[in-house]
Image: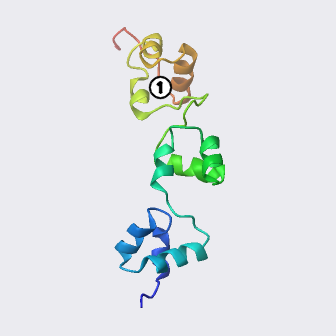
Amino acid sequence: MYRWVPANDKLLGTMPDKEVARRLGCRLTSEEQQRRKLHIRSVNPEENAMLGKISDEELALLTGRPIGSVSNKRCQLGLAKPNAQRKYWGPEEILLLGTVPDREIAARLGRTLGSVKGERSLLGIRAFSAQPKP
């Protein structure tokens, strides 16, 4: 009989039950029992496939999961929120700031000039200057 070790709890809910059981070398029923005891919901690959494709609110309604859980999972997977009003800056975009005029960056990235100036200013990056520094 498999004796559950508390350190194994961190795997629960991170992948399908069968995979957790296989990795731990325990029976599926042992894994399921421990997951339920800790009130951790199982991972559903079909639900995960919908993350970032439909709104968190829609997915929460479809799955019966709390919206916070859906949002957290999407963020853990590094997926953008579909149809978000705010477009977050990615590392590649930030690297462009100050390298060419703000207007050019705005056009290249499909952002407003104000957005580019604001982000550059927020990060303390100087505006591009075509004149060489003395």
Image coordinates for residue 18, horizontal then vertical, percent: 41, 69
Image coordinates for residue 16, horizontal then vertical, percent: 44, 63
Look at label 1 and name its amino acid. Answer: Ile
- Residue at 43% of width from left, 16% of height from top? 105
- Residue at 51% of width from left, 24% of height from top? 120
- Residue at 44% of width from left, 76% of height from top? 28
Closer-to-camera residue (115/82): 82
- Residue at 58% of width from left, 16% of height from top? 114
**Is 130 rendered above or below residue 51?**
above
Closer-to-camera residue (58/98): 58
Image coordinates for residue 107, horizontal then vertical, percent: 45, 12
Q: Residue furthest bottom?
A: 1
Label 1 crowding class (10 Å Cα cut-off): few <14, some 14-19, many 20+? some
Q: Residue furthest top?
A: 131
Quarter of the image with the C terminus is top left
Closer-to-camera residue (17/95): 17
**Is 27 rendered above or below residue 14?**
below
Which type of secondary structure does the marked residue at label 1 adopt?
loop
**Is 113 rendered above or below residue 45?**
above
Image coordinates for residue 103, horizontal then vertical, percent: 47, 10
Q: Quadrant of residue 22?
A: bottom left
**Left of 120 or right of it: where is 37?**
right
Closer-to-camera residue (5/19): 19
Quarter of the image with the N terminus is bottom left
Q: Label 1: which residue? A: 125
Count of picture labels: 1
Identify the image's colour scheme: rainbow, by chain, secondary structure or one colour.
rainbow
